[in-house]
Image (spheres, helix red, strand yellow):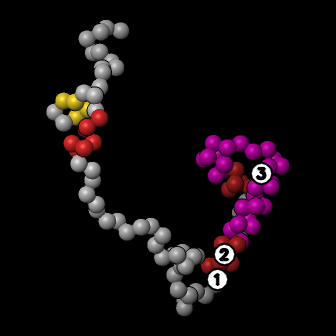
Amino acid sequence: MAISANEVKHVASLAKLEFSDAELQKFTGQMDQIINMVQQLSEVDTTDVPVTTTVTDAFNVMREDIAVKGTDRELLMENVPERKDGFIKVPAIIDESEEG
């Protein structure tokens, strides 16, 4: 199945692309080659070929996800200069009462 310059021009217009005549001819040839390669691939018999999900032998390179106890809140709050209701109190950056 060959692709025509009109088909490439139509697809280019859908993608909001503009090509010169030389570019249109170049891309038409390239698209035709791509379509031919895909057609060749569809002719290959892959009946007994196992599915390839990865090309490396690595199974799982991530560490196991194990929950560990976190640091005690009181220990974390020891060096906090000011706190309120178990949270760190910080100065207001934006005062909502000011009009701006």
Disc 1 element = loop
Figure quadrant of residue 66: bottom left
In three-dimensional space, the C-alpha distance between marks 3 and 1, rounded to whole angstroms, equals 29 Å
Residue 39: mark in rendering: 2
Residue 35 location (% of width, % of height): 68, 68
Disc 3 element = helix
Q: Residue type at mark 2: give it.
A: Gln
**Most frequent secondary structure within the magenta stretch:** helix
- The residue that mark 3 highlights is 24
Around disc 1, counting alpha carbons within 10 Å, would you say few (fewer than 14), some (14 to 19), or many (20 or more)?
Answer: few
Q: Is residue 50 visible?
A: yes
In three-dimensional space, the C-alpha distance between marks 3 and 2, rounded to whole angstroms, equals 22 Å
Which sits earlier in the primary sequence, circle 3 or circle 1? 3
Do the residues bearing badges 2 and 1 touch, measured as CB atoms within 8 Å? yes
Magenta stretch: includes residue 48: no
Residue 13 location (% of width, % of height): 64, 45
Q: Is residue 50 left or right of residue 62?
A: right
Q: Residue type at mark 3: give it.
A: Leu
* Residue sitting at x 72%, y 61%: 31
Do the residues bearing badges 3 and 2 touch, measured as CB atoms within 8 Å? no
Q: Is residue 91 above or below residue 45?
A: above
Residue 91: mark in rendering: none
- The residue that mark 1 highlights is 43
Mark 3 or mark 1, which is nearer to you?
Answer: 1
Which contiguous range is marked in magenta?
10-36
